[in-house]
Amino acid sequence: MSERNASRSAGCLLLTLGALIASGGAYADGIQVTEAWSRPTPPGIDVGVAYFVIDNQGRNDRLVGVSSPVAKRAELHISQMEGGVMRMKHLEAVEVKSGVPTSFEPSGRHVMLTGLKQPLKEGDAFPLVLSFANAGPVKVQVHVRGTSGTGEGGHGADRSKMKQAR
Amino acid sequence: MRPRKIALLAAAVVAVCAGIVFGILSRSGDRPEIAGFVYPEPKTISPFKLIEHNGSSFDLDALKGKWSFVYFGYTYCPDVCPTTLAELSRAQELLEEAGLDAGNQYFFVSVDAQRDTPQRLAEYVAFFDRKFVGATGADEALTKFTQEVGVLYSFPEGRKGKSYAVDHSSTVALFDPNARLAAVFTSPHKAEEIVEGFRKILRRRT
């Protein structure tokens, strides 16, 4: 019985590890960052975005900074509806509570990349470093999906359609 | 005895409340519920004059003869605008699949004319959808048009440099083929909700 359980657990662990690797997740000190994705940038636009989900199985932490070699600057932002107007605000830090997933998603919290050194193209991936007060830096690969990628279920690219006028 | 009276009274109150709620619901029955707001009577808009990315006039005449989906934003917007335009593009595709797209046009009105030249708009909208048309205009013309549509925008940090942000209503306005404002879809936008809302509005008119 216990042997079977043990092999089951091992199987689960392998599956979890496999899933982590497959989703490009980064793991450090109880902090796991998954589902990191971005949109391709339109011609002539040097601002971009990054979305992801932070899972914290360790102690309460704070995301205090972000950087990427593909952009001159990366900032934590939030799009918020106020009095019928969408406002983009700069966030100094984001609380990452233990056991609660912290989502960065369209029309909400996001990383804004400014001064992109080159356009982001569908299918590309680029590194993003998230700095946590306790866990330190966590590096994650951000996948650039199609324009219609919604980030749901990690299949944005599959559902994407590129209707570019070429 | 007494609890029974209370029960009866409670039942009566519930019945009256249900009646009121039913009355309200059935009265609003002719106004479709969408992810936004449908005007009881389509709203007439004063003449305005903006410019399309191809150089032609974007005015009341441009809105006539077709249903027009009009979204407001700016091209340096990293999050909300690309998200909405991607959803609107998906809505366009869904409508096309349903045979409900031939009589439609789709506009992206930039409230940031200083950075969004017609040429930049042309490249930008084509990136999202071949049917999208970009438009913008002088400050006064933009203010006039957006106010009538109920869209607000401002430049909280001013308009210096290249990377200023713009606060703006993230609404998709729907004009009927008589260039009247029929409905507005409010943020966050989902393609399926836009399509469903449009179907309901079409149904009301037939």
Image: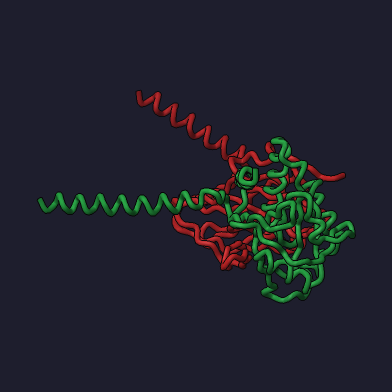
Residue that sits furthest to the left in the current view: B1
Q: Quadrant of residue A117?
A: bottom right
- Horizontal placement of A4 versus B98: left or right? left
Answer yes or no: is residue A119 visible.
no
In the displayed structure, B40 sits above or below B100; it is: below
Instruction: Return the x and y of residue A32 as percentages of the image width and height.
Output: 54, 48
Point 56% across, 47% down: residue: A27
Using the image as rendered, state which of residue A83 and residue A3 is in the foreground.
A83
Instruction: Return the x and y of residue A161 as percentages of the image width and height.
Output: 74, 40
Point 61% across, 67% down: residue: A89
Using the image as rendered, state which of residue B161 and residue A4 is in the foreground.
B161
Q: Quadrant of the C terminus of chain B?
A: top right
Instruction: Return the x and y of residue B205 as percentages of the image width and height.
Output: 64, 46
Give the red chain's letter. A
In the displayed structure, B96 sits above or below B136; it is: above
Count of labels shown? 0
Instruction: Return the x and y of residue A115 as percentages of the image width and height.
Output: 77, 62
Using the image as rendered, state which of residue B154 and residue A54 is in the foreground.
B154
Write down the colour of chain B.
Answer: green
Point 41% across, 49% down: residue: B22
Using the image as rendered, state which of residue A108 and residue B206 is in the foreground.
B206
